[in-house]
Image: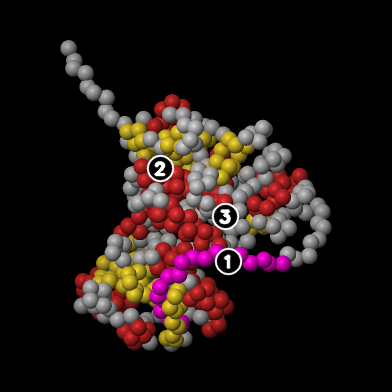
Amino acid sequence: MFTRQDEWNRGYAEGRRYRPLDDERSLLAQHVPAPDGGRALDVECGTGEPALHLASMSYTVDAVDWADAAFPSTDTRLDDPSHGSVHWLHLDIERANLSQLHADGYDLIVLRMVYAFLRDRTRLSRTLGRRLRKNGALVVITPLAATTPAERRGIALDEDEIAHLMSMWDQAQRFNANGMAVLVLRGLKRPAVQITNTPLPQRSSVTEVHAVVTDAQGRGHVDWRPLHALRRLDRLSTTSARALDLIWPGVLPYAPSAHMYPIDRAYPPVPGESLAAVERRERMADRVIAGGWAPSLPVQQALRAAPRHRYTPESPLRTAYHSNLAVVTEHNDLAQATSSVSAAWLQADMAEHLRLTEGMTVFEGGSGGYNAELIAYVVGPAGRVITVDLDPYVVRRTRRLTAEAGSGRVTAVLGPAGEGREHVPAQSCYVDRLLRAYRSRSHLAARALLSVSLRHPTRSPVVRRTPRPQQASG
């Protein structure tokens, strides 16, 4: 099963192909015929057979794939009379800015033999569902786990996964095409958070062994408790507390200090998240957008994509995704807040004021993790974010959480702003402390944004760099 871009490139270069279209042709013609002016999106189009077939059905087609070696050859395109109706796009549908897609949406979106490979299926399904026109359909074509060899299980969906996908839509039809399931989905439902109580297993006493376990959804558990609930435990051993603080800085605000001697500093990413997190993020984004704080599509997409709760492990989901609350992430010895993740509406507003574009390099003075990651989603795969802070704890936390849950485009630097000089000069600069302290770095940016608290409320003025007037000589 391919999971990396280079694996897909190598597979296409070696001549590997998807199974050819068969019974799907008649099902597509019967259930999703092209309306007048119909437009379709073929997600992870591979060598292009489905896209060319949709074009032959009178759709205008956007065909996207993240592999450089995908897309049909020039000879194949010219031999097919429908090639002129297909627009080929090199795009990572899960991580890239989707502004290249058609602004007016689609009558049909097809995911053929690709849904099982997606990292964040629920989020992408909702993202694509919002791009459907009235009466539009999302069609998912997938092998079935029950009839797929065990060594290839990763390419297929089981019945529970199919049922979950169908439950997200008002109308969901299922058909069979030569052993594969063809799902025709219409009417994306509004997300609804469902909370159920799961009985805890019988507790047992364990001594001398301390383990921190990360499950498939990227959540840490000790004694089967979520991270934000650990501070309410009656007792927790010093060793466990230190281990937890090293893995998730801040989850235990008063954990005893410990020295860290890492063998490998390259923390692996931990993909996946719960359905409740996805749905609460959707609601948060809806509230921020309705409030007028995120008018641009890239910022809206970033709000729906960046996993805010992964940067606030000390808080429950309802707090992490509250649109008007900041989450405190560090306290001093007097229990006063010294660092926080700002409210979502404010971070969206600041991103809008920076006028970010795809491919930018952005400097952030004052780290935290989530805000840098939000900006990273806006500037896309070709962009990057450099975030600098004077507090070793804040930088360690930012590095740890962005490594585990981030896009890989955020670099956290410890020290004053000048320490970031070896990184690429930034086109935009966001300063969350004192402007004077970061003047040595912010002069490189065309636009700087300051988060300033003047009693109440918080404001974010934009400072623009203008060239110094030339003085006449002589």
Q: Along the horizontal axis of the image, is 240 left or right of 327?
A: right
Depth-wise, is mark 2 or mark 3 nearer the camera?
3
Query: Horizontal placement of 116 versus 22: left or right?
Result: right
Q: Viewed as shown, does residue 299 lie left or right of 243?
A: left
Instruction: Tell me the residue that label 3 is attached to.
Output: 318
Between 435 and 50, the one nearer to me in the picture: 435
Q: What's the distance in space between the residues labelled 3 and 1, CA to CA?
A: 12 Å
- Please give the name of the residue rendered at 47% of the width and 63% of the height, measured from the top-left corner: 123
| Chain-order first, disc 2 or disc 1 | 1
Comparing labels 2 and 1, the label whose residue is closer to the camera: 1
Considering the image in quadrants, where does the C terminus appear?
top left
The location of residue 328, given as percent across then percent down, is 58, 42
Tell me where residue 206 appears, x and y as whole percent.
81, 56
Q: In this view, does 187 lie above or below 434?
A: below
Where is mark 2, residue-wise?
Answer: 350
Q: Does the magenta stretch include residue 69?
A: no
Which residue type carries mark 2? Met
Q: Is residue 265 above or below residue 69?
A: above
Q: Mark 1 points at which residue?
A: 194
Q: How many circles with numbers are drawn on the protein?
A: 3
Q: What's the magenta region?
A: 180-199
